[in-house]
Amino acid sequence: MIETTLPRGNVLPRIRPWLGIAAAASFVVASVMALFWAPTDAVQGDVYRILYVHVPLAWLAYLAFVIVFLASVGWLWTKRPFFDAVAVASAEIGVLFTGLFLVAGSIWAKPTWGVWWIMFVMYVGYLLLRGLSTDFSRRATRAAVFGIIAVIDVPIVHLSVLWANSLHQLPTVLRAAGSPALDSSMLLTLMISLFAYTLIYAYFMSARVSLELARQGRLWTQT
Amino acid sequence: MDRIVLVAARELRAERRQPDGVVAAVTFIAVLVLLESLVVGPQIARDADVASALFWLALAFATILATMRSFDRELEDDALEGLVALPGGRDALFGGKVLSLAIVLVLVATIGGVLSLVLLDLPVGLPAHLLIVVLLGVLALPPIVVVDVVLALRLRARAALVPILALPVLVPQLVAATRGTSAALTGDAVGALSWAGLLFAFAVVYTVIGLTIVPAAIE
């Protein structure tokens, strides 16, 4: 048997409007800074500005899948449906952001960055596994185990930038040797973009988790 | 550990009596090697990178085939429930399947590898290094595949779902095995041993993770 009680005093609906406003405002600020305030790159010209979308999307893809991992461990440990709701919400949003990241990456640099496609396909597989399982508890457990296994590939994806023969450019901000190779105004714009996109992720998560909790509530009522 | 060895021995006995998994896997690799030289032509087929990549892709599919056959046998005989009900049965089931599959895959890889070398007339720069890479590569594949077959057990569209789940997760292993094999074929000793080390790490990490979380997934 699984515990079917939902978290008491669910604050998600109350904070969501404020989260939405903060996400929209910070997105506007980040976009203005990226388009007009940050200087033009000496080598790549204005095309480099897609960096302010591309890097935050990559960060969110990682973040989303790490949240899937943590929520999966939470489900296996406690069997609380809330964790399964967080896992499915984060996986869906992660797939969305990884897809957008791949589109942005293809615009910026023509070569297909295969490793990101693999990550994308892996989490589509995760959602497929959920879709094919009918029983709630079994579905959550299966998805949790796959979510944990899959996230182990995430650091390998990141390390693949450093491994031989990669098509991807070497890290610019988090470098092994010394400070970021980025102008201070560019770095500030990037940090604000990262913050804005993280708020967008948080907003999407609050909405999707609420929907999933409501769906689970209906499920318990029916059974 | 004793239980893992017992399950593996039981699995190998079943495979010896009814070797359809091995036969299917070996036939699959042989057909792919033949098709490769026909489709891309003998010159490209003999390229060390191409031949290595195809060999490991074929072996990955063969692993999926053999694993699914192994679990099908359990389901047909209603043996899974009994095994899982035993004390420590879930750990033993995962460990035993991984161990027996690794042994079966050594056989499949040996036959498939010899076929590839002979049919494609591949020169081998470093035979000992090649053996090490293939052995460690074979150990790195089963943990992931067994996990994914367990997750998809009793689901509809299982035959399609297992490759979708397993192959993306297997990419690092396949890259390391292909690069290592190619390095051994072309005589790059340092490259072959580096990739072999990575394969060993993958085998250990995924086996430990499998033993930790797979029991929760076995119903």
Image (cartoon, coloured by chain):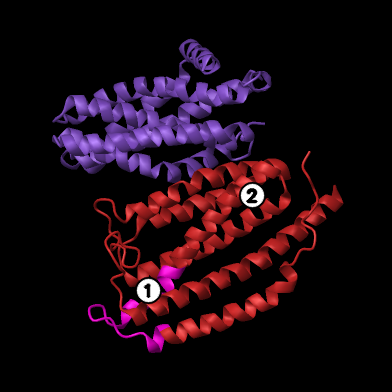
Q: Tell me residue B140's x, y (percent).
A: 39, 33
User: Considering the image in quadrants, where does the C terminus of chain B appear?
Assistant: top right
Q: Which residue does the numbered mark 1 point to in the structure image?
A: A51
Mark 1 element type: helix
- The answer to whether residue B212 is left or right of residue B24 is right
Q: Earlier in the sequence, mark 1 or mark 2?
A: 1
Between A175 and B62, the one lying in front of the other is A175
Crowd around label 2: few <14 · some 14–19 · many ≥20 (10 Å): few
Q: Nearer the viewer, mark 1 or mark 2?
A: 1
In this rendering, the answer to whether A44 lies above or below B60 is below
Amino acid type, mark 1 = Leu
- The answer to whether residue A211 is left or right of residue A202 is right
Question: Chain B in the picture: what colour?
Answer: purple
Residue at horizontal 81 percent and vertical 56 percent from the top = A218
Between B149 and A58, the one lying in front of the other is A58
Q: Tell me residue B114's x, y (percent).
A: 25, 23
Residue at horizontal 57 percent and vertical 62 percent from the top = A93
- Give the quadrant of residue B119: top left
- The answer to whether residue B132 is left or right of residue B60 is left
Do the residues at pointers 1 and 2 share their chain?
A: yes
- Give the quadrant of residue A138: top right
Q: Which residues are magenta?
A: A34-56
Report the predominant secondary structure element of the magenta stretch. Answer: helix
Q: Which residue does the numbered mark 2 point to in the structure image?
A: A131
Mark 2 element type: helix
Q: Chain of mark 2?
A: A
Q: The chain coloured red carries which letter?
A: A
Q: Chain of mark 1?
A: A
